[in-house]
Amino acid sequence: MTRLHVNVDHVATLRQARGSQYPDPIPAATICEMAGASGITIHLREDRRHIIDRDLELMRKVVTTTLNLEMAATDEMVHIARAVRPDICTLVPEKRQERTTEGGLDVAQGFDFVSIAVAALREAGIRVSLFIDPDIDQIEASRRCGADMVELHTGDYCDAPYSHKDTEMHRLIEAAKVASGLGLRVAAGHGLHYHNVRPVALIPEVEELNIGHSIISRAVFVGLDAAVRQMLEAMAER
Ligand code: PXP
């Protein structure tokens, strides 16, 4: 069955909005794990707008499943990751003004700096995933620069009007096949919610989904434990 990694950034977003000590993403991570999540994902952004360094350090101590750190491929982040040693680092593009990660990492264009970051992380024993659009060029470049895994950006599929959903789904299916054929492990994520997750969870090569906003949003109404369990049910629905 496809594994669920819950992105708890938005618990920290709520905290940072008021500069308070609550809500704390650390107990949120534990609740997600107890509800059946196979991993916790956090994004330490350059501007520290949600997750802060203290969260990363405590997560490393508290998370008992898999800790996935999303980060830009910068010297600062590579240095932090090598010190804290999450289980996986997912390299993402990052722009200060964006509301959330927009588009995949252009590995083909930024091949040299991405390769340096991948090598530095792998040397520290950290697995590396690259968050990319479902494009064959990007997948081939990811393989060449030594990544273990790719996370396919599902944003275009999620945002597509009904008439284009099948086309975008086909892109994801083909990309997953090609990546797996090249020996890369395959994850997917971004924009997934309770009503669009199932077809992505069904792609045989996709072993893991990273989902944040929809789960934390539903938690406001039903609680985090129920929100995670309901997502696991939505992924497994027949
Ligand atoms: N995967 C990556 C690489 C991301 O940057 C994000 C957003 O932080 C997610 C998955 C989760 O996206 P969403 O919050 O839309 O579920």
Image: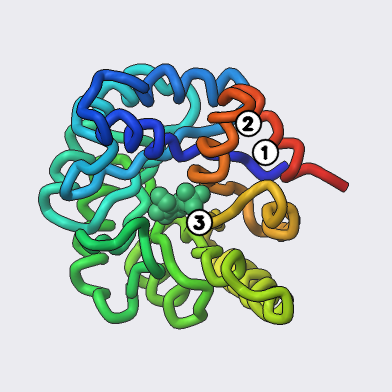
Q: Which element is circle 3 on?
A: loop
| CB within 8 Å, label 2 to label 1 | yes
Between 178 and 229, the residue placed more toward the observer is: 229
Question: Which coloring applies here?
Answer: rainbow
Q: Residue at x 30, y 29 (%)?
A: 15
**Relative to residue 40, is residue 238 depicted above or below?**
below
On the image, the x and y values in percent for residue 167 come to: 68, 80
Which residue type does callout 1 highlight?
Answer: Met
3 or 2: tag closer to the N-terminus: 3
Q: Mark 2 points at which residue?
A: 227
Ligand 1 neighbours mark 3 (CB distance < 8 Å): yes
Crowding at mark 2 (Cα within 10 Å: few <14, some 14-19, many 20+): many
Which residue type does callout 2 highlight?
Answer: Ala
Image-based side of 112 in relation to 10, left or right? left
Between 81 and 30, the residue placed more toward the observer is: 30
Alpha-carbon distance for marks 2 and 1?
A: 6 Å
Q: Mark 3 points at which residue?
A: 190
On the image, the x and y values in percent for residue 70 come to: 34, 48
Alpha-carbon distance for marks 3 and 1?
A: 14 Å
Q: Residue at x 17, y 39 (%)?
A: 80
Q: Residue furthest right?
A: 238
Image-based side of 22 in relation to 174, left or right? left
Which image quarter: residue 161?
Answer: bottom right
**Relative to residue 99, is residue 145 depicted above or below?**
below
3 or 1: tag closer to the N-terminus: 3
Crowding at mark 1 (Cα within 10 Å: few <14, some 14-19, many 20+): many
| CB within 8 Å, label 3 to label 1 | no
Q: Name the residue under label 1.
A: 231
